[in-house]
Image (cartoon, helix red, strand yellow):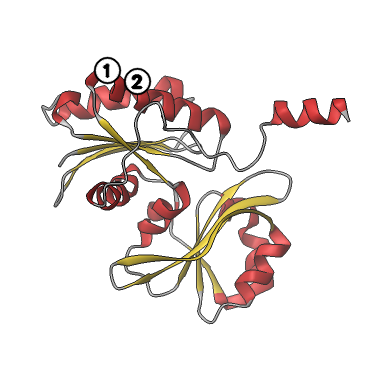
Amino acid sequence: MRILAIESSAVTASVAIMDETTLIAEYTINHKMTHSQTLLPMIDEIFSMIQMKPEDVDVIAVSEGPGSFTGLRIGAATGKGIALALDKKMVSVPTLAAMAYNLYGDDRYICPVMDARRKHLYSGIYTFEGNRLVTKKDVSLISYEELAQELAGLDRKVVLTGDGADVAGDFLKQQLGDKCVIAPPQIKSQRAGSIALLAMQMAQEGLFVSADEMKPEYLRPSQAEREKAEHES
């Protein structure tokens, strides 16, 4: 089984191709370019470099969110377009769980955090039991203060990963001291390789979605929807 994975939930744009045993290729850009500028050229480039074609993959995996509204929509539209054009199966991968896979096998609690603005984070808490990722706390939209309280109650050290560590890391470390550490840069950002790894597991369990069914998970209304609700209240 070969998987094409697409990650576009935040600033990072990342694509990867993986089979059951090998990460064949991964292309990641963490720079201020829009995903509409980067994703399709990256996909073209990665297939060209390994002398494969999109029709050679079996599954299209897309990061489902939470995250940036625009980024998730572009990633979903890109993946769905390829899947529909080539009649491929899709896997919709939870973004934060895939971020936890960046620290595969770590015996500490892993807390992926994504900046949700207004002093809030998209967050979950995970740990590995052997090679199995276990959800300690499912994905939620949470304030810095509430997350600090939850992490303080855990019985082991916590690793923060994700762009939320850039905005909330100092606050959380001040509250938690040595109990809290921040993942190094090479494994802190979203990676399509981790999307592919989790997608491979999900595919082997038969957790496919059709291109029509695949929808991003936003967790909160968009800014436009919030402003409309405020205006109407």
The residue depicted at 35 percent of the width and 36 percent of the height is: 209
The residue at which mark 1 appears reads as: 85
- Left or right of residue 123: residue 39: left
- Secondary structure at numbered mark 1: helix
Is there a contact, CB below 8 Å, between mark 1 and mark 2? yes
Disc 1 marks which amino acid? Ala
The residue lying toward the viewer, choosing from 176 and 85, is 85
Indicate whether 14 appears above or below 178. above
Q: Position of residue 41 (x, y in %)?
A: 32, 21
Kindly identify which numbered label has been placed on residue 112: none
Q: Position of residue 112 (x, y in %)?
A: 50, 57
The residue depicted at 29 percent of the width and 45 percent of the height is: 196
- Left or right of residue 230: residue 102: left
- Left or right of residue 155: residue 63: left
Q: Is residue 33 visible?
A: no
Kindly identify which numbered label has been placed on residue 81: 2
Q: Position of residue 93 (x, y in %)?
A: 39, 44
